[in-house]
Amino acid sequence: MPANLTPEFLEARERFRKAKTDEERLDALMEMLATIPKHKGTEKMRADIKRRIAKLKEKQEQRRRSGGRSGPSYHVEREGAAQMVLVGPPNTGKSSLLALLTNANPEIAPYPMSTFRPCPGMMEYEDIQIQLVDLPPLTREYTEGWVFSLVRAADGAVFCVDLSLDDWRGAAEEALELLRERHIVLGKGPTRQLDWRTVELRTLALGTKIDLASGKAEDFREWAAERFFSTGLVSLETFEGVEEVRALIFRAAGIVRVYTKKPGHPPDMEQPYTLREGATILDVVEHIHKEFVERLKYVRLWGSGKFDGQHAPLDHVVQDGDIVEIHTH
Ligand SMILES: Nc1nc2c(ncn2[C@@H]2O[C@H](COP(=O)(O)OP(=O)(O)OP(=O)(O)O)[C@@H](O)[C@H]2O)c(=O)[nH]1
Ligand SMILES: [Mg+2]
């Protein structure tokens, strides 16, 4: 029976044949399974692909359990309203930025590859805290798999580019390419899964060391504007631009703060609830208390540009700084 295989499938099968490691094999098989036409004529092939995937996964699992060979791997517990990773080529000031914005004490060194494990720290922004995670640099020779896993799991990225380098653009593009090979796209966002294996992270592109980079700021802005969500420029030497960085990171994190008030009382402006951008009034109610959803009568809203205590539709998308008053039965 003709199988009508697609070019995508054939390409993945070719990749599978050429694969040298189990990781590459598994990746190619997953792609084959995703792109194979699903009809009677491919039933046997699909079963075969699934069997091979199961086998490889089992092998990986065994290797993980026995602990050996794969080297260290790190996990960073999420804390605060969002988790943002600091990424970029070596020596671009990632650890310096973490040290400046948070309580953390990462290793900072005048030579590349000084960071070799993740270092989290909490950045205060007005009334909330955002977790920044400093990571080892992105280089073809040096970066281990777990770095990419941590990047994938983040809410957004701060991509550091050392503007004191003559070829800052080449260095930046190499790092982006490395991420792209691992199916991670630093872009405008919103942060989301693009397909079954590719994620896009909303990204702030941060030109660093501008004290050593006279005349390059405009070129950098131009280069970054079409690729990323936002652009910033800092010197951690003269502290130029540092004030703005917190707000830039907050906006790239893609979260909104919502405050609550009780009927007849002023709003509680101390402790906002934080939700992902795009959240609706109903999401807010559910976030505050799952039970409220069933007992909900209506929600009064202040903010969102035009609301001043009116009833808000449940599908209304909330904005940063909105105040809600929830009325239940
Ligand atoms: N002149 C100047 N130097 C800076 C600036 N930011 C960082 N540096 C210096 O650049 C060097 C590298 O800084 P790190 O923060 O260790 O860079 P990194 O990106 O964490 O480096 P890796 O972990 O090796 O990738 C250090 O000597 C810093 O003091 C800056 O804005 N201006
Ligand atoms: Mg570092």
Image (cartoon, helix red, strand yellow):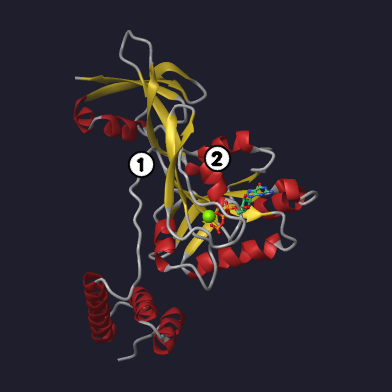
Residue visible at 33% across and 32% down in the picture? 284
Give the image quarter of residue 16.
bottom left
Q: For the view shown, which residue lies furthest in the top direction?
A: 264
Residue 202: horizontal and vertical position, in percent?
A: 51, 50
Q: Residue 61 in the image: x percent, y percent?
A: 23, 72
| Circle nearer the viewer, 1 or 2 | 2
Quadrant where the N terminus sits is bottom left
286 or 77, nearer to the observer: 77
To which residue does mark 2 refer?
Answer: 100
| Amino acid carrying mark 1 in the image | Glu
Q: Residue 324 is drawn in which quadrant?
A: top left
- Residue 185: x and y in percent read 51, 60
In the image, residue 162 above or below residue 21: above
Regarding mark 1 in the picture, which secondary structure is present there? loop
Q: In this view, does 308 lie above or below 18?
A: above
Please tell me which of labels 1 and 2 falls first in the chain: 1
Residue beneath the point at 58% across and 48% down: 229
Q: Residue at x 59, y 51 (%)?
A: 93
Residue type at the position of mark 2: Leu
Please say whether residue 52 is visible from this viewpoint.
yes
Residue 25 position, x and y percent, is 36, 81
Label 2 crowd bin: few (<14), some (14–19), many (20+), radius 10 Å: some
Quadrant of the image occupied by residue 150: bottom left
Query: At numbered mark 2, what does the secondary structure look like: helix, strand or loop?
Result: helix
Front-most of residues 167 and 54:
167
Q: In which quarter of the image is the C terminus?
A: top left
Q: Which mark is residue 79?
A: 1
